[in-house]
Structures are given as structure tokens and as C-alpha cells.
Amino acid sequence: VVILDEIGRGTSTYDGISLAWAVTEHLHDAIKCRTMFATHYHELTDLAEVKPRVANYNILVRETGETIAFLRKIVPGSAEKSFGIHVGRLAGLPQEVIGRATEILSNLEEGEFEEPGKPKLARKRSRKAPDTENQMSLFD
């Protein structure tokens, strides 16, 4: 039995997913051992579609309004969503951080972009033009 926890953590997202996927394929195809693998890479759940002995399980969660309760029960299937921001709230992060994280997550999930390939993370703010009447120009 091989137990793996967060293979590829601490690397870039694509490096981590690639390493975790390749390790899983190797254990499945070459070693053929039983393996339990904990990961936050949701993309890895696709392995169950192409590898016959791969199965996904997740921790059962009960959602009530804006609160969640981890029920400490493992059930078949992949997680339908992530609860990272909820966990941050449970860990005591300030509400302003939770609110901002929620806003950034929404922008990323909606694919809103200001420039090609750059997620729009900054809030939309109307900025007052600076008073330039009394400002000397650098170029005069």
C-alpha cells in the first residue's frame, strides 16, 4: 500500500498536476499497488475515466446557507466544489480577506480578463483623476 499526500504541492499548478498524474499512472500501470492519494488537484479525478482501477472518494460535507460542516465520512465520487474560502473563515481569517478572496475567486471562475492571459484580480474602482493643475511636468 502506498499513501500519498499532495504530490506536487509547492510547485506551479501545471508542474504539480503533471507530476501527480504521472506518479499515479506509474503506480497504476507499472507497480499495480493499492494507493490512497489525497490531493487538491481536481483535474486528477479524470484519471478514473481512463484507468480502470482508479476510483474517486471525497469527504462528505453538509452545507446550510453559508456554513459548512465536514461530516468526517468518506463517500464515493469526486468533490463537487472546493471549500478553501470556507476553511479560511473557519481558521479565523479576517472578514475583509474572506470577502476579497471571494471576489477574486468569482473573477477567476468567470474568466474575466483585463489583458490577454491576465486574470482580473483588482476590484473595479472609479478613480478620481489626480489634480494636475499645481503639478509640475517632468517634460517641460
Image (tube, rainbow, N blue to C red):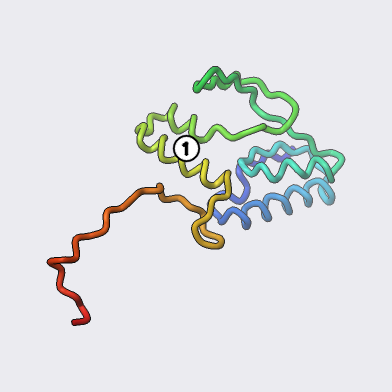
Name the image quarter holding the C terminus: bottom left
- Taking the view exactly as shown, the residue that stands out farthest to the front is 133
Residue denoted by label 1: 102
Q: Is residue 21 left or right of residue 61?
A: right
Place of residue 77 in the rendered image (x, y in percent of width and height, measured from the top left):
74, 30
Q: Is residue 75 left or right of residue 71?
A: right
Q: Is residue 78 left or right of residue 113?
A: right
Q: Residues within 10 Å of mark 1 (few under 14, many from 20)?
A: some
- Taking the view exactly as shown, the residue that stands out farthest to the left is 134
Q: Quadrant of residue 22?
A: bottom right
- Residue drawn at x 64%, y 38% is 38
- Residue drawn at x 78%, y 47% is 27
Residue 5, placed above or below residue 121 = above
Q: Nearer the viewer, residue 53 or 126?
A: 126
Q: Nearer the viewer, residue 43 or 27?
A: 43
- Residue drawn at x 49%, y 57% is 114
- Residue drawn at x 57%, y 44% is 109
Query: In the structure shown, which secondary structural element does the residue marked by tag 1 occupy?
Result: helix
Q: How many circles with numbers are drawn on the protein? A: 1
Name the image quarter holding the N terminus: top right
Place of residue 47 in the rendered image (x, y in percent of width and height, measured from the top left):
78, 44
Place of residue 86 in the rendered image (x, y in percent of width and height, measured from the top left):
49, 30
Residue 91, placed above or below residue 131 = above
Q: Quadrant of residue 100?
A: top left
Residue 105, placed above or below residue 15 = above
